[in-house]
Image (cartoon, rainbow, N blue to C red):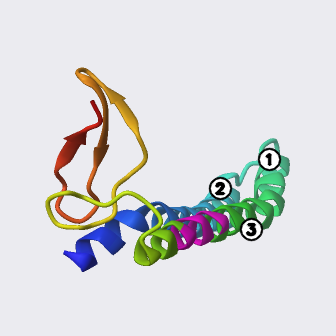
Amino acid sequence: MLNQMLLRLFAVPLLLLLGALLALLFLGWFVPHQMNSTILAGLGQQAAELALPVFWGFILAAVVTALYQGFQLWRWHEGKTDMCANCGGMVSSVRNGRYGPYVRCLACGKNRSLR
């Protein structure tokens, strides 16, 4: 269950890293190679110049998100945050649902009402 919890916890930073690589490939290679005409060559050049700043922006967002999630994991490990009543796993932030506020366990996936 710990592996599932860690995967759910760090899914967003992993997706941001994947997005960084895709943005680098798309803006740095695919778009400039598709803009072969003389009219669109300038747009291809601008896309190639924009590839690295977008890449580093995604990397920065991934690092900041991973640090925040790591801090939340540390708080759970120290017992300073809510835990699942079923398995003792880490719970997500409070969400508003159809039947009121609830939290979802990142380890077992069960919901718990806060009423």
- Distance from the alpha carbon under mark 1 to that under mark 2: 9 Å
For label 2, the SS is helix
Q: Which amino acid does label 2 sit on?
A: Val
Residue identifier under label 1: 43
Q: Which amino acid does label 1 sit on?
A: Leu
- In front: 59, or 22? 59
Looking at the image, tell me whether mark 1 or mark 3 is earlier in sequence order.
1
Residue 52 vertical placement versus 84 (above, below): below
Left or right of 23: which side holds 8?
Answer: left
Is disc 3 surrounded by few (<14), some (14 to 19) or many (20+) residues within 10 Å?
Answer: some
Left or right of 92: which side holds 75?
Answer: right
Q: Is the magenta stretch mostly helix, strand or loop?
A: helix
- In front: 21, or 105? 105
Residue identifier under label 3: 56
Q: Give the residue at x 46% y 72%.
A: 73
Left or right of 113: which side holds 39?
Answer: right
Classify the position of the C terminus by image quarter: top left
Left or right of 79: which side holds 30?
Answer: right
Classify the position of the N terminus by image quarter: bottom left
Looking at the image, tell me whether mark 2 or mark 3 is earlier in sequence order.
2
- Distance from the alpha carbon under mark 1 to that under mark 3: 21 Å
| Of marks 1 and 3, the one in the foreground | 3
Stretch of the chain drawn in magenta: 64-71
Residue identifier under label 2: 31
Label pair 1/3, CB-CB below 8 angstroms: no
Residue 76 pos. (x, y %): 42, 70
Is residue 14 one of those drawn in magenta? no
Residue 101 pos. (x, y %): 33, 30
In this view, which residue lies farthest toward the top?
Answer: 98
For label 1, the SS is helix
